[in-house]
Image: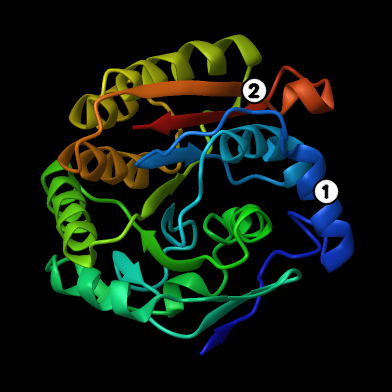
Amino acid sequence: MNRKPAVAGQFYPDNGRTLSSLVQSMIIETAEKRDVTAIVSPHAGYVYSGGVAGEVFSKINIPNDVIILGPNHHGVGQPVAVYASGNWETPLGLVAINSGLADIVLRQSRFMANDVTAHLHEHSLEVQVPFIQHLNPQCQIVPICVSGLDYTSCREVGLGLAQAIKEYGRPVLIVASTDMTHFESQSSAQKKDQLAIDRILAMDPEGLLKAVRSRGITMCGVIPTTIALVAAIKLGATKAELVKYATSGDVAGDYARVVGYAGLTIY
């Protein structure tokens, strides 16, 4: 099954040439690249968060296989929904689903389910794909759309992902898609988001989930990020680095109600 783009023409251009030029403009050609286990990347409209996403993607080598974890904004489908076969279409062309890796992933956790319905209208994973396509046209993906889970469940899913990647035996990048605080003042967003960022930098997935929930931080992709941290640590990652933080206010000039965007590498 080919998944059609849900937010082309809204979050990013629906014309392939225009989209390619826009993504290229957000890539830093001179950035020093490193191999990483995972990244955290925002998923708002490119005009707002594309600069942060572009800088993160600029600093990493993208292998031929990428697992993308994103939050389920619509509440449709299974709690941990794996898009396990077919292709995803963007204005840049088709990206193949790595069905072999997806099958391994599905075997590793009782929470995983083969479910396309959660993905049909979800933007959080889709907006990552053009960056991946642009920088590695050979890449295959495994999209996983995630709803609310407790930490024990996040840990089980993360450990399952790590085991699947080990079993697969080839380099796999994990992309955790999230925006940060939503619709608070610039100063409030920055303070709250720093609390979450500090937990990621400390490689503390349980502390991240606790901080977000106890401090009322509206980080929509905290579950994907928690899972990605658990998996990365199990795969041997020991460090995280903040690449860039920005808000919608930096673009729009409205600092009364902003959305925060953070880009991080985990290696």
Which amino acid does the dot numbered 2 rest on?
A: Ala
Determine whether label 1 and label 2 are within 8 Å by CB. Answer: no
Q: Secondary structure at mark 2?
A: strand
Q: What residue is shown with label 1?
A: 22
Which amino acid does the dot numbered 1 rest on?
A: Leu
Q: Secondary structure at mark 1?
A: helix
Residue 228 coordinates in the image, percent (x, y):
31, 44
Q: Residue at x 46, y 62 (%)?
A: 64
Q: What residue is shown with label 2?
A: 246
Q: Residue at x 16, y 64 (%)?
A: 167
Q: Residue at x 31, y 23 (%)?
A: 239
Q: Is residue 182 visible?
A: no
Name the quarter where the C terminus is drawn: top left
In the image, which disc is placed on residue 150?
none
Circle 1 packing at 10 Å, graded few (<14), some (14-19), many (20+), is: some
Numbered disc in front, either 1 or 2: 1
Is 84 displayed left or right of 96 in the figure?
Answer: left
**Foreground residue, 146 or 231?**
231
Is 114 displayed left or right of 48 in the figure?
Answer: left
* Earlier residue among tags 1 and 2: 1
Q: Quadrant of residue 258?
A: top right
Q: Quadrant of residue 238?
A: top left
Is 132 displayed left or right of 222 in the figure?
Answer: right
How far apart are the two marked residues, 1 and 2, measured between alpha carbons? 19 Å
Q: What kind of colouring is applied to the model shown?
A: rainbow
State whether residue 130 is above or below residue 82.
above
Residue 2 coordinates in the image, percent (x, y):
57, 86
**Foreground residue, 162 or 14?**
162
State whether residue 134 is above or below residue 1.
above
